Amino acid sequence: AEPLPAGWIVSIVAMGLIYFGMKFLRYALDSWSALILAEQFRMSSSTAGYWSAAFDWIGFLGVIAGGVWSDHIAGARRTPVIFWMTLACLGCTCLMWFFGLSSSTFFIVMLGLIGFTAMGPDSLLSGACAMDAGSRHQAALAAGIINGLGSIGPIVQEPVIGWLKQTAGVHAVLLLLVAVVFLTTVGTLLLMRYERGRL
C-alpha cells in the first residue's frame, strides 16, 4: 500500500470537521429559512420559498469566486481562501443574528451573502482540497473522509434546530449558527497555519 504523507490524516480529518460545520450551516438555512421568512415576516409559503432561494443562487457565485481566487494564489493553495471566506461568513452570520429579524430585506440580503461566503469553501473542501491531498488513491480516500464527516452535519442540524426553535425561538437558532461558523472559522485558521508549517 502507498504510504500516506506525513500529517495527511490530520489535514483530512480537520477538513472533514470544517466541512461538517459548513454542511450544518448550509442545510440549516436551506431547511429553515423559508419557514422563518413565512413566520417572522408573514410571507406566503410560495413567496418565502422564492426568496429563500437567494442562499443557493448567490451561493453559486461564491463557488465560482472561491475557485477562481484559489487558482490565482501561488501554488493554487486552497486553505487561505477557505479561511477568508469562512471569516466573512462569520461576519454575515453575526449580522443576521443581530439584525436579521428586524427586516425581511436585510434577512434575505444576509441569506445571500452567507450563501456566497459558505458555498465557496464548501465546494473547495469537497473537491479541490481532496484532489490536492496526494495521489489519485489518496484523493479518493480524502474525498470519502471529508464528505463522510461533512454528511453528518445535515443529519444533526434537523433535530437540533427543530428542538431549539420550539424551545428557545428563532433568535437562539441564529445564535447557534453563529457558534457553528465561529468554531468552523477557528478550525480553518488552525488548518491554514498547520499546512503553512508543512510547506
Image: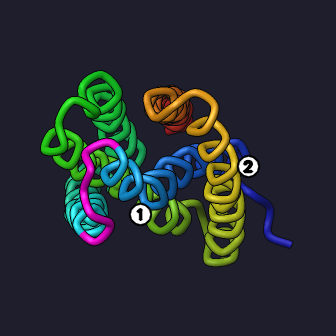
Label 1 sits on what residue type?
Ser
Q: Which residues are magenta?
A: 40-46
Q: Is residue 71 visible?
A: no
Q: Quadrant of residue 138?
A: bottom right
Q: Residue at x 38, y 45 (%)?
A: 82
Q: Nearer the viewer, residue 189 or 150?
A: 150
Q: Residue 191 placed where, x, y %? A: 54, 35
Q: Is residue 134 visible?
A: yes
Label 2, on which residue? 9
- The structure's colour scheme is rainbow
Q: How many marks?
A: 2
Q: Residue at x 41, y 63 (%)?
A: 123
Label 1, on which residue? 123
Q: Quadrant of residue 71?
A: bottom left
- Can residue 50 be found in the magenta stretch? no
Residue 157 - label: none
